[in-house]
Amino acid sequence: MPVITVDGPKLTKEQKAKLVKSITKTASEIIKLPEQSIIVLIEERERDNVGVGGVLLSDKQPD
C-alpha cells in the first residue's frame, strides 16, 4: 500500500477532502493500483513552526 504524506498549512475539512480525493485518484492512475490501496496522511504545520531563510513564516509579510 502506497502512503503519501502531505506536509503543509492548516486546511479546512473541505480542502482536505478535495486534496485527498485528487491525490488518491492521480496516484492510482499513475501507480496502476486501486484507489482503496492508497493512503494519504496530512500533516498540518502552524506558521510559528516553520522557518524559511532563517525567518519564521509567522514573522514574514504575506506576498
Image: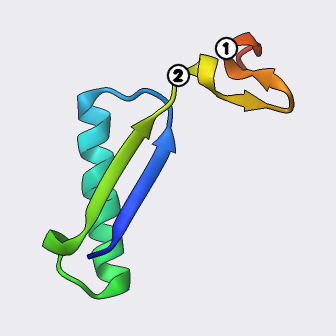
Q: Position of residue 11 (x, y in %)?
A: 38, 29
User: How far apart in space, not on screen, are marks 1 and 2 (Cα)?
Assistant: 8 Å
- Foreground residue among 63 and 3: 3
In terms of sequence position, does the residue under pointer 1 or pointer 2 come before the other? 2
Assess disc 2: are there few (<14), some (14-19) or many (≥20) residues with their C-alpha within 10 Å of its C-alpha. Answer: few
Q: Of helix, strand and loop, which one carries label 1?
A: helix
Name the image quarter holding the C terminus: top right
- Residue placed furthest toward the right: 53
Rendered residue at 70%/17% (across/down): 62
What label does residue 13 carry, if any?
Answer: none
Which residue carries the number 2 mark? 46
Q: Can you tell which quarter of the image residue 32 is in? A: bottom left
Give the left or right position of residue 6, taking residue 40 as reference: right
Amino acid type shown at disc 2? Glu
Relative vertical location of residue 36 with respect to residue 20 in this rendering, above or below: below
Q: Position of residue 53 (x, y in %)?
A: 86, 32
Amino acid type shown at disc 1? Ser
Rendered residue at 13%/70% (across/down): 36
- Foreground residue among 61 and 58: 58
Relative vertical location of residue 26 with respect to residue 58 in this rendering, above or below: below
Which residue carries the number 1 mark? 58
Name the image quarter holding the N terminus: bottom left
- Residue placed furthest toward the bottom: 32
Q: Of helix, strand and loop, which one carries label 2?
A: loop
Contact flag, marks 1 and 2 (Cβ < 8 Å): yes
Q: Position of residue 25 (x, y in %)?
A: 27, 68
Relative vertical location of residue 5 with respect to residue 14 in this rendering, above or below: below
Q: Position of residue 14 (x, y in %)?
A: 24, 33
